Image (cartoon, rainbow, N blue to C red):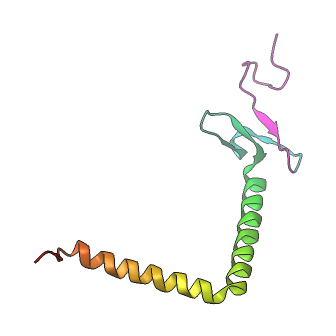
Amino acid sequence: MRDQRTNSGVPGQPTSKRCAACHASKPVDEFYADRRGRLTGRCRDCHRQQTRANNRRRHAALRLLITAHLEEYRALLAAQRTRRDGDSSIAGGESDVA
């Protein structure tokens, strides 16, 4: 018996899939595959839209956090610069041993 989701007659290899987000039926090449080779639930377009929305939301939250604690943020940046500058002198071969 043929797989009911396919039109190709090859069981287990559908030619199209319905997106869980936009509910449109699209060819399988419009979906990403995970590490195991399984197709994701959302099509590439919906996946990109969701990723962009998440990135915008995350960046907005980070900006809000930075503005709320600006002095702490500047202090952390200064400490990071100091460590980075200090690490480069150690990598240069200078020694503290007399």
* Image location (x, y in percent) of residue 19: 83, 44
Q: Is residue 91 left or right of residue 25?
A: left
Residue found at the very far left of the displayed protein: 98
Whether residue 10 is in magenta: the answer is yes
Whether residue 42 is in magenta: the answer is no
Q: Which quadrant of the figure contains the C terminus? A: bottom left
Nearest to the observer: residue 89 or residue 50: 89
Q: Who's the residue at 68% across and 34% down the image?
A: 38
Q: Who's the residue at 39% across and 78% down the image?
A: 83
Nearest to the observer: residue 72 or residue 58: 72
Q: Is residue 86 left or right of residue 22?
A: left
Q: Is residue 20 left or right of residue 94?
A: right
Q: Which quadrant of the figure contains the N terminus? A: top right
The segment highlighted magenta reads 1-21
Q: Who's the residue at 46% across and 79% down the image?
A: 80
Q: Is residue 95 above or below residue 18?
A: below
Residue found at the very far right of the displayed protein: 23
Q: Is residue 49 above or below residue 9?
A: below
* Snapshot quadrant of residue 91: bottom left
* Snapshot quadrant of residue 17: top right
Q: Who's the residue at 70% across and 37% down the image?
A: 39
Q: Is residue 14 above or below residue 88?
A: above
* Image location (x, y in percent) of residue 15: 75, 32
* Image location (x, y in percent) of residue 42: 78, 46
* Snapshot quadrant of residue 58: bottom right
Q: Is residue 16 left or right of residue 36?
A: right
Nearest to the observer: residue 79 or residue 35: 79
Q: Main secondary structure of the magenta part?
A: loop
Residue found at the very far top of the displayed protein: 1
Q: Is residue 4 above or below residue 18?
A: above
* Image location (x, y in percent) of residue 77: 51, 83
